[in-house]
Amino acid sequence: MTKRTKGKKLVYISENLIDGVAKISRTRGESIGKVIEDSLKEAILVSQDGYDVKQVSDYFKVMQAHRVLGGVFVPSGVLDSLIEAVYPNGREQLITRFFESGRWHGKYLKERFEKPIEAFKSFLELSRWDLNEVEVKEQANSIKVRCVSTVLTREGTELLAKFIEGIMDGLSHKTTKADFMKGLIVLESEF
């Protein structure tokens, strides 16, 4: 029995892209064809999972920013327990810390990303707050943020709201409305 291989097709690619791929192939010690083929295989897998390569690239950049900013993944049950233990006597301190951490994140997003509001939305979508819905609408001179979670505690919701308010401050936006209740945050800010 002979193994049948599929034929190859010629695809025209811009010279700039080929130069970039050539640089990658030299670094990896692989052929240009292998780098392109591997990249296309991954793009197909990502697409089959319902994403596009641009979205995955954006998510990766946001995850790198999260790492740079000192973010860690903690199981939500552990985080909830810690917040529950500290919250009764340390509420004000926690609120201040979450706001300041948000400010730092906002300033970093503003400096690091060409479109910091889009990066902010991706950051919320990827965060470990177990958000079911994230909406960030940029209008003429304002931004509206809405987050919904079916599992977020009231305390966790308040702290996330302060974190988001801090991010907006770090992005040089003044919060004009900040409402929250268990599992729901609505925040509006203007430039």
Image (spheres, grey):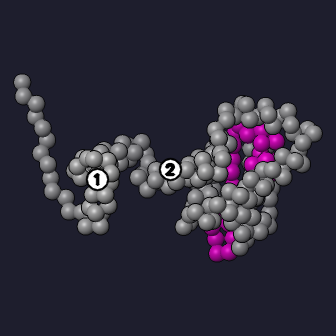
Q: Reply above or below: 94 against 12.
A: above
Residue 102 percent across, percent down from the top left:
73, 55
Side of 164 relative to 95 (left or right): left
Q: Secondary structure at mark 1?
A: helix
Residue 160 belongs to the span the image colors magenta: yes
Task: Report if residue 168 is visible in the image.
Answer: no
Under mark 1, the amino acid is Arg
Task: Report if residue 2 is visible in the image.
Answer: yes
46 or 22: nearer the viewer: 22
Residue 24 percent across, percent down from the top left:
32, 54
Side of 163 relative to 90 (left or right): left
Residue in the picture at 59% in, 53% down: 65
Label 1 sits on residue:
26
Residue 157 percent across, percent down from the top left:
77, 45
Residue 82, label in figure:
none
Residue 139 belongs to the span the image colors magenta: yes
113 or 144: nearer the viewer: 113
Label 2 sits on residue:
60
How far, Cα to Cα, is label 1 from label 2? 23 Å
Residue in the picture at 44% in, 48% down: 51
Q: Reply above or below: 86 against 179.
A: above
123 or 142: nearer the viewer: 123
Under mark 2, the amino acid is Phe
Side of 164 relative to 61 (left or right): right
Residue in the picture at 64% in, 75% down: 140
